[in-house]
Structure formats: structure tokens, C-alpha cells
Image (spheres, rainbow, N blue to C red):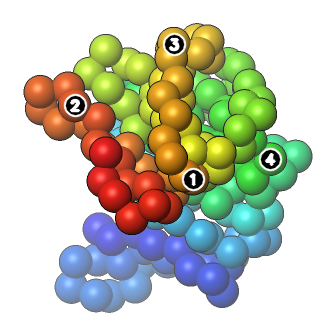
Amino acid sequence: RIYFGNRDKLISALKNTGRQLGQYQASGQIPASAAVEHQGKIYFPSEDGCLYAFDGKGSEKWRYQAASNFKHSPLLGEKRIYISDSTGYLHCLDNKGNVLWKNRYDTGISTSASMCYDGTVLFGSRKGEIIAVHPTGEIRWRIRLPKANRTTPAISREGYIITGCDDGFVY
């Protein structure tokens, strides 16, 4: 199955043949990619401030409402979902939509999050930092880049963190 959202506020499910299985009307645009669990649950961010969770058949299971909109893709960790909002909060939810923690980072969050092999969550900031957060929300470390970072950090097999920067370089 193929799942996608769009700027028309629609979340769609298709068979791999292209036949439509269903649609769901969200209240806000779907600005980023969904995240899919291996058990089949799908998570869509929305600019209405909701994170929508659907089962593999397209039925809404739950939704989490934040105070601000979501512009980045959710990250799935060990029984956790991480998603940032437009005001600089990183939300950590369990797979039933319950808030485990929510922390605000004064630098703002400008990328989707990614995860290191040890569970550390990484994201880029509007002020040119890569911030590493423990699964409990505590900051582990931060690295300053010359300019803002809008590229989701990638982690190599060897553990190197690779990201682009607004100065035109890859670090």
C-alpha cells in the first residue's frame, strides 16, 4: 500500500496498482512525509497541529493535538514517536498518542529528527546547531554550524553525522 498526504488536506491510501483504497480529510495541509511502523500503523503530521495515527486499513486510531502546527515528518523510535512543532517544541509520544514529554528548544527546530543507533535523537536548528537529545528529552550535546541547518541529519553506518548547511557546505 501507498500512503500520502497533500496540500489539499487529504490523506490517501492506494494499492500498489494505483487503485484508491480510501481518503481522509484532515483539517490542515499535510506538509511532510508520513512515518510507517512495521506493524502497519501510519503517522501523518498536519499543519492543523495534529499528528494523525491510522491503522494499515486506513481507520483513524487516534490523533494528538499540539498548540502549534507540525511541518516535519515524525520519527519512530523504540515504542516512541518524536515530532517537532513550529514553535520549537519536540514532542515525544508513546504509540497510543500519550505524551511522554515535551521540551522547547530556544534555537527553534528546522528539520525532521533522525536517530542514532543508541537512541539519541538529532535535529537541526534555525540558529545553526545540530542538537542531540537523549530519549528522555535531556540535551546530550550540541554542535554549532556556520549558518542555519535545514537538512535532516543523516547517520552513517560508522556513526558519522552528515548534514547540509545554509552556507552551501555539507558537514
The disc, 1 or 4, on the residue closer to the chain's N-terminal end is 4
Q: Quadrant of residue 49?
A: bottom right
List x then y, in percent, for residue 17.
21, 85
Q: Name which residue lies at 29% across and 77% down.
A: 15
Labels 1, 2: front one: 1
For label 3, the residue is 140
Front label number (3 vs 4)? 3
Estimate the x, y position of residue 134 in percent, counting from the top left. Answer: 51, 14
Q: CA distance from mark 2 to mark 3?
A: 16 Å
Separation of residues labelled 2 and 4 (CA atoms)? 28 Å
**Marks 3, 1: nearer the viewer:** 1
User: Quadrant location of residue 72?
Assistant: bottom right
- Pointer 2 or 4: first along the chain: 4
Label 3 vs 4, first from the N-terminus: 4
Q: Is residue 140 visible?
A: yes
Label disc, if present, on residue 87 of the rendered structure:
4
Q: CA distance from mark 3 to mark 1?
A: 20 Å
**Mark 3 Cα shell of 10 Å, populated few (<14), some (14-19), many (≥20):** few
- Report the amino acid beneath label 2: Tyr
